[in-house]
Amino acid sequence: MQELVEAKFSIGNIVKHRFLNFRGVIFDLDPKFNGTEEWYNAIPKNIRPKKDQPYYHLFAENEEIFYIAYVSEQNLVHDKSLLPANHPDIKQIFSHFDGEKYITHKKDKN
């Protein structure tokens, strides 16, 4: 039986990293760590997050670049600025920003 995991954030939420200088839009999540051991072990041990928590895929940005980030729930906080994000890939998944979060494209019903 699969364990039910309650995630603090949802797809479309804008979040900031708790310690690093970037923000992003959540476009996917894993109920627990689903990355590579190489990636995980590259994080310094004293700040390495637990694996047993949700991990989020973000369209991330800072003042210099756009990129994709994979971040543990413990290292994210809501971005309360209410400013839209500028990542160019947002439009692939989301139709618009409603002033608080991004809304996914509606799927056509067959």
Image: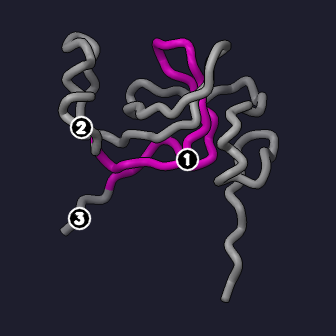
Q: Quadrant of residue 13?
A: top right
Q: Residue 40 at what x, y percent from top left?
A: 24, 28
Where residue 87 sits: x, y (%)? 68, 33
C-alpha span from label 3 to label 1: 22 Å
The reply, left or right, for residue 65 in relation to residue 84 is left
Q: Is mark 2 on a helix, strand or loop?
A: loop
According to the image, label 3 marks what residue? 2
Q: Distance between the residues labelled 1 and 2?
A: 19 Å
What is the three-letter code of the residue carrying label 1?
Phe
Residues at circles 2 and 3 in contact by the CB criterion of under 8 Å = no
Mark positioned earlier in the residue sequence (2 or 3): 3
* Cα separation between marks 2 and 3: 21 Å
Specify the label residue 36 is tagged with: 2
Q: How many labels does the image show?
A: 3
Left or right of residue 37, residue 78 in this image: right
- Dot 1 or dot 2: first in sequence order is 1
Badge 3 marks a residue whose secondary structure is: loop
- Quarter where residue 89 is shown: top right
Taking 97 as reference, is 81 above or below it? above
Q: Of tags 1 and 2, which is closer to the observer?
A: 2
Residue 18 inside the magenta-drawn segment? yes
In this rendering, the label closer to the viewer, 3 or 1: 1
Amino acid type of the residue that numbered disc 3 sits on in the rendered structure: Gln
Three-letter amino acid code of the residue under disc 2: Thr
Position in image of residue 2 (x %, y %)? 23, 64
Per the rendered image, the range of residues in magenta is 5-33
Q: Is mark 1 on a helix, strand or loop?
A: strand
